[in-house]
Amino acid sequence: MLDSLLNFLRSTGFSGLTPGSIAMMCIACLLLYLAIVKKFEPLLLVPIAFGVLLTNLPFAGMMTEPVLEIQKHSIHTLEPGGLLYYLFQGDHLGIFPPLIFMGVGAMTDFGPLIANPKSLLLGAAAQFGIFITFIGAIASGLFTAQEAASIGIIGGADGPTAIFLSSKLAPHLLGPIAIAAYSYMALVPIIQPR
């Protein structure tokens, strides 16, 4: 009985689970809980959590490249690629960043700014954080100008802009910058005075 149960588990996706993927799935569930139940930045956390879940599914083939047969005058697809492969192509080819910028701009609500014009000063003052961080990173001597610019853009409190600029200027810092930018943005409702 135990042997048949072990054979069954080996034939399922559970055999490919690692402690790291289990931990990441737990983090994804936490992000989904925060986004859906607690309403903390759902537009950011729900897609991030689904991405984390999809990439940590064992044996799902989400990043599998398509298998092509190239003939003299045509190309035939023998096996289609995984879902995340095609989503990555949208990022790799530069299609998604302009769409994200356009979507964020279209969702901007100017009602609070019109009701309280003094808040414009807070928004303008926040942009000085970009320059202060840039100058501080350069002055530390640990970063190049490109790396310092990628770090400084986090002060703009705009995740897509930080990711886009980092992917162009300092791709090796993209992961830490994306996490820092989105963590900062997700914590705004908590640290913002009421």
Image: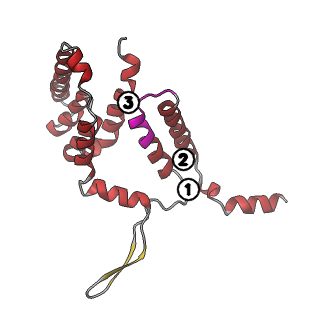
Kind of residue sitting beneath label 1: Pro
- Residue closest to the eye, 102 or 175: 102
Q: Earlier in the sequence, mark 1 or mark 3?
A: 1
Kind of residue sitting beneath label 2: Ser
Q: Residue furthest right?
A: 1
Q: Earlier in the sequence, mark 2 or mark 1?
A: 2
Magenta segment boundaries in residue numbering? 38-48
Dot 3: element: helix
Q: Are marks 2 and 1 in contact (CB under 8 Å)?
A: yes
- Residue closest to the eye, 19 or 128: 128
Residue 161 image-quadrant placement? top left
Q: What residue appears at the point 23 percent right and 37 percent down from the top-left corner? A: 105
According to the image, label 1 marks what residue? 58
Q: Position of residue 111 (x, y in %)?
A: 25, 23
- 3D distance between C-alphas at marks 1 and 3: 27 Å
Q: Are marks 1 and 3 in contact (CB under 8 Å)?
A: no
Residue 45 image-quadrant placement? top left
